[in-house]
Structure formats: C-alpha cells, structure tokens
Amino acid sequence: MAQNLKEIRRRIKSVQNTQKMTSAMKLVSAAKLRRAQERANQARPYAEALRDVLEELAKNAASLRHPLLTERPVVRRGYIVLTSDRGLCGPYNAGVLRVVQRERQGQEAALVAVGKKGRDIFRRRKEEILAEFTPIGDNPSYLLAEAIGQEATAAFLSGRVDQVDLVWASSVSSVLSRPKVEQLLPVVRPRSDQPSGGVVPLFEPDEERVLAGLLPAYVNGVIYSALVDAKAAEHAARMLAMDSATNNAGDLIRSLILLRNRARQAAITSEIAEIVGGAAALE
Amino acid sequence: MNSYQLRVVTPERPFYEGPCTFMILRTEDGEIGVLHGHTPLVSPLVPTAVDLRLESDGTGRRFLAVSGGFLEVRPEQVTLLARTAEWASEIDRERAEAALERAEAQLADPASDRVRAQRAKRRAEARLKALALEEGVSGPGRRQAQAG
C-alpha cells in the first residue's frame, strides 16, 4: 500500500510538471499569435494596392498575354504546402496535409515543402519534392516568399508542372482556422467586370512590360500573405492545443489526488487495525 | 505648390504615409518627377534613391532607397509599392559599399549569375545615392565626424 502511495505522489508531481510546461507554451503562443496577427495586418495594404494595380491593368488591357497567365491542360500538378516547423499544435498540420491528399485525388504531384513537418512527412511517403524551405521560423520574411515564388515559377515555366496551388491553414479568427487552397499559377486573370472608373492611367513603358513586372510581384505577394496568415493560424492552433492539454492535466491531477487520498486513508486504516489487533492480542 | 498624399508600402509593412509636394525617382523608363496633378500612371521601378520634398516651400527633404517595385500615381494619391524601403539615415554605408564591391567582382567573373549580380549592384548604387543626397542636404562633414 505504501509503495502505491509513493507511486501516485510521483505521478502527481510529473503531471504537475507537464502542466507547467503546457501552460507556459500556451502563454508564449498567445504572445506570438498577437505578433503574427499584427504582421498579417501590416501586410494587407501592400497586397491590396498590388491587387488594385493588377485589376486596373486587366480592365484596360484585357487581351494581355504572359506566360504566367497562360493556362494549359493540367497533367501534373504542383502544390506549395505550408506547414509548421514544430509539433504540439493540435490538428494544424494534419488538416493541411489532408487537404493536399484530397485535392490531388491520388494523382502524382510535385510538392514544394515549406516547414519541417510537411517536409518530413513527404520524405517518409517518398513524394516528389520540388524544393523545400525549412526552417521558416516565427517571422517569415518577404525574401522567403520570393525564394518560394521563384521555385514555383521556374517549375511552372519549365513545364515540370502545369498548375501550382498553394495550400495553407488560414486563420479565420483567433481560435479558428481552416485549410485553404488557392491557385497560384497560372495567375487567375483578375475579373474586370467593373467599368473603369475615372481616368485611365498610363502604363509606362507599356502594358506588357508593366505586367511582366507585376505578375511575379503578385505571386510573391500572395505567398507572403499566406505565410503570415499560416503563422497566425499555427500559433492559434498551438495555443488551443496547449490550453486543452493544461485543462486535461488539471483533470488528471484532480483524479490522482483523489486516488492518493484514498490510498493514504487506506494505509491509516490498516495501521489502526494493526494496532488494535496488536492491543487485543496482548490482553 | 499643392501637395498630394504619398504612401510608401512594402510587402511587410506600410513604410510611410503623409503629404508630399514633389518627388524624384527612377522608373524603368528613366528618371521621373511627380508633382501634384501628375497624370495617372503605373510604372515599374528599378532600384532607386527617392528624393522627397514634403513641404510646399521645397523644405522637409527626406531620402530613401527602394530596391524596385512600382509607382502608382492617381489623382491626389501616389503609392510607391516598394519591394524594400529604407530611409537614408538607416543605411549602413560600409555595408552598401561592400555590397557594391562584391557585385562588381561577380560581374567581372564570367562564371557568376550576371543578372543577379547586376541587380545587386543597382541596389547598392541606389543606397549610396540616397546617402549622398542626404549628405548633400545635411552637410558632408556630419557622417565623417560620426565615423571618426
């Protein structure tokens, strides 16, 4: 009985230690989440301004051609998959990877792995990895987005893949995220349903050259937005996972304490019984 | 002189927003000056120093370096979509000079990626130009005094 009591005490101590870690991780994730959301907000003005320019251009030059806009029959697909570098973030990576599997429908595909978790899984499954970017850290830079964009564009232009989709977990709110798939290449021609309002701007040197500059910048911009969005989702997922881990540890500790008290009581009872029995034997 | 609203945004954050009366910078087509009432325009930028005059009397001069992007002029609103942007005061002269030397060495080496080296060279030149402009306004001795 005494052995059992000791063991229970040790387990309580151990679960308490785990709880300390999970609750610290939860606080860290909450702080990182705030920062990641801030970065996502800061990235918005550029993305919107760039999109505006592209739409303006599409409105005024609907017949524009560019290799990055050219659709072709899709034989091979490419996916850029954004995952986290580290685990302990609940269903965050599993959700993204499941969507990739669903999207490709058993067909072979070339993958660009961004983040360590995704890369490890793809390697284990012996998938074709076009390029990998790890680790991505907590503050993905625009330079990283440019590097990813360059790989994707090269693969598309060389014909290794006929379409490139971007898959990531998009944060819907600070607790909820949802996997999202967006076609990156060929660039979806922006809709020009609104009539051009006001003065038509001049495109210098000419529409073609402006477009040639805009499209890669747009692709990189979309990737960067997804990167910071995914980071916010990752921290939110980790915060949530650590919150429930902390709660579970609390429940576990409570039931262990109950067990411990019962064991202790049993030990005392049996001790008294022994004393009483001993005294009775002496009489 | 009338002023217009100037916005400098980079992919990572909005960099600057405020009224401006005149600015000079370089597009793919060459050097361009933007005053109030400029015709609406979209043009890609090469890496360039940007010379801003914020006040209507030509004072309030500020200089920055951008490493490419786009200039978008609309009525009353001018947007610089800059790949990266930094104020001249934030530029590290030694680093920019080292980058320039490195890029020139790469250009001399036939085995290297010439396009990339050329771009790096223009970025370094844009930074040094912004620094030179800043020193032209605030007096050339200042930075040396700081360095010594």
Image (cartoon, coloured by chain):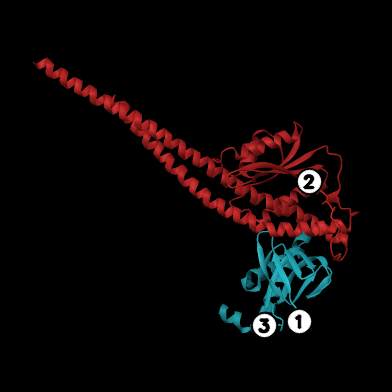
Chain colours: A red, B cyan
Q: Nearer the viewer, residue A164 or A113?
A: A164
**Residue A155 location (% of width, % of height):** 78, 46
Quarter of the figure with residue A272: top left
Q: Which mark is residue B137?
A: 3
Q: Nearer the viewer, residue A55 or A199?
A: A199
Q: Are marks 2 and 3 on the same chain?
A: no
- Please rate how many residues cluster around mark 2, counting C-alpha atoms within 10 Å: few if below 14, some from 14 to 19, many from 20: some
Please indicate whether residue A282 sits to the left or right of residue A201 in the image.
left
Query: Residue at left 82%, top 48%?
Result: A157
Quarter of the figure with residue A46: bottom right
- Look at mark 2 in the image and give the residue it sits on: A155
Badge 1 marks a residue whose secondary structure is loop
Residue A135 appears in view: no
- Look at mark 1 in the image and give the residue it sits on: B1
Is residue B76 positioned above or below A47 on the image?
Answer: below
Task: Chain letter for mark 1, please.
Answer: B
Q: Amino acid at mark 1?
A: Met
> In the image, which is nearer the foreground, mark 1 or mark 2?
1
Task: Chain letter for mark 2, please.
Answer: A
